[in-house]
């Protein structure tokens, strides 16, 4: 028999020995909570409790898989995102804290617009994956109008639908299978996207838990990681209403390229860049012009 405290100590040591986790103690706590059905707070507060044999076996197997690199979110089957418990598995990318920053920025901008004119804004989450962005927007902005979520992967879209159902949002968000914006039935007020942006040559720089377990389709892009965003911004003017908002997450070294793509797609747009927790440029909000930019006299016919 082993106590929770002993299990945490041993589990932390084994995960640390694997060398593939930056947070071995936290990982062990989350895995023990999952194995015992307790909360992480209970695990920390009641170290004297004893593990049942079945719990010990489950915890041991989880620790071994984590030491080999498998992400905690896949092992326990969920990740918290914007206060929501999002189901996670290898069908889609694990939602990141950095993406929460994009969602918070979008919410603030949409709330200001809603309070100013009372419009029930429509939204599309492009490349939805687990559905995290669309579901977070639906939860925290219940005054939104139609909400669409697209993905080219039928497996990811199935996972997103499962998340919507468990959150009671399956009749709020409309899921559409297809490439980028093409499935949308109509233009919307807000386009949100967290598309693949890792250059293929950078695959070897990613941590093992990312490159070995998360879906390549959701990670990598051709053309220095910008291929998906080039196509996204080429399509965006046809699907974003006049005066609409576009919010995208991008790679740490892609700010200049993203700004250029946004301004090419929407001449006269206002672009604001936001940083992630490490201080890297990570997302952009693009306020499209409320009216078409007048042609220069030299361009007039």
Image (tube, helix red, strand yellow):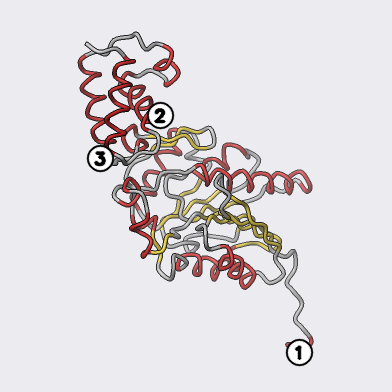
State the SS at label 1. Answer: helix
Residue 298 shows which numbered tag?
1
Say above or below: 137 vs 217: above
In the foreground, 41 or 139: 41
Closer mark to the observer between disc 1 and disc 3: 3
Classify residue 118 as left or right of residue 69. Answer: right
Say above or below: 10 vs 224: above
Query: For the residue carrying disc 3, how many other residues have a C-alpha within 10 Å: few (<14), some (14-19), or many (20+)?
Result: some
Number of labels in the image equals: 3
Classify residue 174 as left or right of residue 256. Answer: left
| Residue at image point 42% right, 15% down | 42
Separation of marks 1 and 3 at Cα, in angstroms: 63 Å
Residue 26 shows which numbered tag?
2
Query: For the residue carrying disc 2, how many other residues have a C-alpha within 10 Å: few (<14), some (14-19), or many (20+)?
Result: some
Separation of marks 2 and 1 at Cα, in angstroms: 62 Å
| Residue at image point 75% right, 68% down | 291
Separation of marks 2 and 3 at Cα, in angstroms: 16 Å
Query: For the residue carrying disc 1, how many other residues have a C-alpha within 10 Å: few (<14), some (14-19), or many (20+)?
Result: few
Residue 68 shows which numbered tag?
3
* Residue 186 pos. (x, y %): 57, 60
In the foreground, 285 or 121: 285
Residue 7, quarter of picture = top left
| Residue at image point 73% right, 72% down | 292
State the SS at label 3. Answer: loop
* Residue 296 pos. (x, y %): 77, 83
Classify residue 297 as left or right of residue 277. Answer: right
Quarter of the rendering occupied by the N terminus: top left
Residue 205 shows which numbered tag?
none
Q: Are marks 2 and 3 in contact (CB under 8 Å)?
A: no
* Residue 236 pos. (x, y %): 57, 66
| Residue at image point 53% right, 55% down | 249
* Residue 276 pos. (x, y %): 56, 48
């Amino acid at each position: 028999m082993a106590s929770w405290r002993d299990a945490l100590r041993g589990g932390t040591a084994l995960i640390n020995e694997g060398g593939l986790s930056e947070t071995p103690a936290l990982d062990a706590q989350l895995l023990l909570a999952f194995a015992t059905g307790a909360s992480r707070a209970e695990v920390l507060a009641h170290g004297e409790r004893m593990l049942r044999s079945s719990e010990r076996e489950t915890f041991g197997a989880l620790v071994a898989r984590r030491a080999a690199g498998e992400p905690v979110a896949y092992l326990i089957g969920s990740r918290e995102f914007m206060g929501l418990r999002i189901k996670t598995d290898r069908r889609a990318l694990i939602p990141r804290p950095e993406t929460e920053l994009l969602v918070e920025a979008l919410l603030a901008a949409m709330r200001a617009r809603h309070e100013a004119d009372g419009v029930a804004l429509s939204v599309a989450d492009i490349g939805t994956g687990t559905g995290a962005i669309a579901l977070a927007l639906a939860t925290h902005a219940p005054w939104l109008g139609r909400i669409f979520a697209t993905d080219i992967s039928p497996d990811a879209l199935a996972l997103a639908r499962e998340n919507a159902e468990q959150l009671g949002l399956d009749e709020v968000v409309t899921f559409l299978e297809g490439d980028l914006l093409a499935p949308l039935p109509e233009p919307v007020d807000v386009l949100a996207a967290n598309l693949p942006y890792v250059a293929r040559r950078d695959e070897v720089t990613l941590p093992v838990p990312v490159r070995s377990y998360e879906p390549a389709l959701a990670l990598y892009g051709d053309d220095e990681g910008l291929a998906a965003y080039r196509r996204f911004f080429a399509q965006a003017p046809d699907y974003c209403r006049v005066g609409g908002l576009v919010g995208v997450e991008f790679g740490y070294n892609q700010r200049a390229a993203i700004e250029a793509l946004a301004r090419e797609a929407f001449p006269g747009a206002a672009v604001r860049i936001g940083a992630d927790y490490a201080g890297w440029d990570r997302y952009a909000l693009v306020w499209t012009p409320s009216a078409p930019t007048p042609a220069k006299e030299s361009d007039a016919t």
